[in-house]
Amino acid sequence: MGTFFNDVIHYFGTRYRSGGQTPAGFDCSGFVRFMYDKAFNMHLPHSSQEMSSLGNKVAKDELQPGDLVFFQTRGRHINHVGIFIGNDTFIHSSLSKGITEDKLKQGYFDKSFAGAVRLLNVPGETLTNPSAQPETNADNSEPS
């Protein structure tokens, strides 16, 4: 996690960009995907919905730094993801602020919280290997 925390601070304030997966601009899942690849050499899908099906489900009161947190900000489907960093705080790509941190217990995020998964320290056979599946760009319009 040390590398992760050292790296992530460089991206605070990076602008939001729909479909973005690079420091030129990130959407929520693009940022998570970029950071997990950079810090943990884990290749995740570019969809918060797909990410939510990986790893082990984690209760909100058992979150650890590095866990992915998911939200339903519109409708009944997961459409936003961030990375929990401890102390009720997560980092994500916000439409209005770009890469930023927010509190899970903040009204908006508390109400739209949809679950969490742990990908770190999970036995390899528990994780699906997204990089083994062909990547499609069928729908990069995922809301964040």
Image (cartoon, helix red, strand yellow):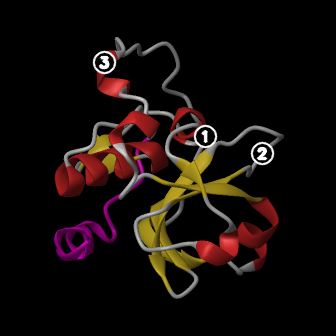
Residue 24 location in percent, x, y? 23, 48
What is the distance, in whole Å, between disc 2 and disc 1 at their CAs?
9 Å
Q: Is residue 94 visible?
A: no
Q: Which residue is mark 1?
A: 143
What is the distance, in whole Å, between disc 3 and disc 1 at their CAs?
25 Å
Mark 1 residue element = loop
Say which amino acid is labelled 2. Answer: Arg
Please report whichever mark, 2 or 1, sits nearer to the chain's N-terminal start.
2
Mark 2 residue element = loop
Mark 3 residue element = helix
Say which amino acid is labelled 1. Answer: Pro
Front one among 10 and 64? 64
Q: Which residues are magenta?
A: 1-17
Asked if the residue at tag 1 contacts the one at tag 2, i.e. Cβ–Cβ closer than 8 Å, the answer is yes
Residue 6 falls inside the magenta stretch: yes
Q: Which residue is mark 3?
A: 132
User: Where is residue 132, by image quadrant?
Assistant: top left
Number of numbered discs visible in the structure rendering: 3
User: Which circle, 2 or 3, is nearer the viewer?
Assistant: 3
Q: Local crowd at mark 1 within 10 Å, few (<14), some, or many (≥20)?
A: some
Q: Which residue is mark 2?
A: 74
Q: Answer above or below: position of 56 versus 112.
A: above
Please report whichever mark, 3 or 1, sits nearer to the chain's N-terminal start.
3
Q: Residue at x 51, y 39 (%)?
A: 54
